[in-house]
Amino acid sequence: MANIKSAKKRIKVINKKTLRNKMIKSQVKTAMKKVIVAVNAGDKEAAAVALKGAVSAIDRAYIKGIYHKNAVARKKSSLTRLVNSL
């Protein structure tokens, strides 16, 4: 445990940021899962709507610095390929 006041504050700030990052990653994973479920069900319209929401969530996470640009491109590409395969 830290003894210095500034180190104690950094621990608090890091914990808060970690929680925020986990929440946003969870939202992205949920959005991606909605696309996958729609594709597995064979519903092209629902998959397209879910894809739009997932891409938006992924882009928001990138803007906030949670994902690297190549990881974002990979996620969007794989989801788009899934939807286009219908």
Image (cartoon, rainbow, N blue to C red):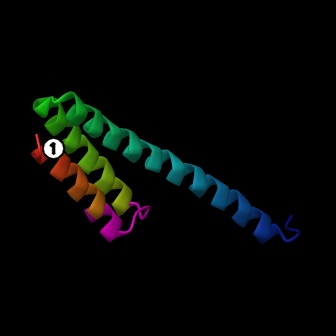
Q: Which residue is mark 1?
A: 83
Relative placement, left or right, of 54 versus 66 is: left
Classify mark 1: residues with Cα within 10 Å, few (<14), some (14-19) or many (20+): many
On whether residue 65 falls in the magenta region, the answer is yes
- Judge whether 47 appears above or below 65 on screen: above
**Relative depth, front residue between 27 and 76:** 76
- Tag count: 1
Quarter of the N terminus within the rendering: bottom right
Relative placement, left or right, of 80 versus 25 is: left
- In the rendering, at what x and y percent does residue 71 appear? 34, 65
Residue at 32%, 43% (x, y): give it. 32
- Judge whether 37 appears above or below 4 on screen: above
On whether residue 68 falls in the magenta region, the answer is yes
Q: Quadrant of residue 77?
A: bottom left
- Judge whether 16 appears above or below 10 on screen: above
Amino acid under label 1?
Val
Residue at 32%, 53% (x, y): give it. 58
- In the rendering, at what x and y percent does residue 17 appear? 57, 57
Quarter of the C terminus within the rendering: top left
Residue at 62%, 53% (x, y): give it. 16
Relative placement, left or right, of 69 versus 19 is: left
Q: Quadrant of residue 11?
A: bottom right
Q: Which residues are magenta?
A: 64-73
Q: Quadrant of residue 76?
A: bottom left
- In the rendering, at what x and y percent does residue 75 appear? 30, 57
- In the rendering, at what x and y percent does residue 12 appear? 71, 57
- Judge whether 19 appears above or below 53 on screen: below
Circle 1 SS class: helix
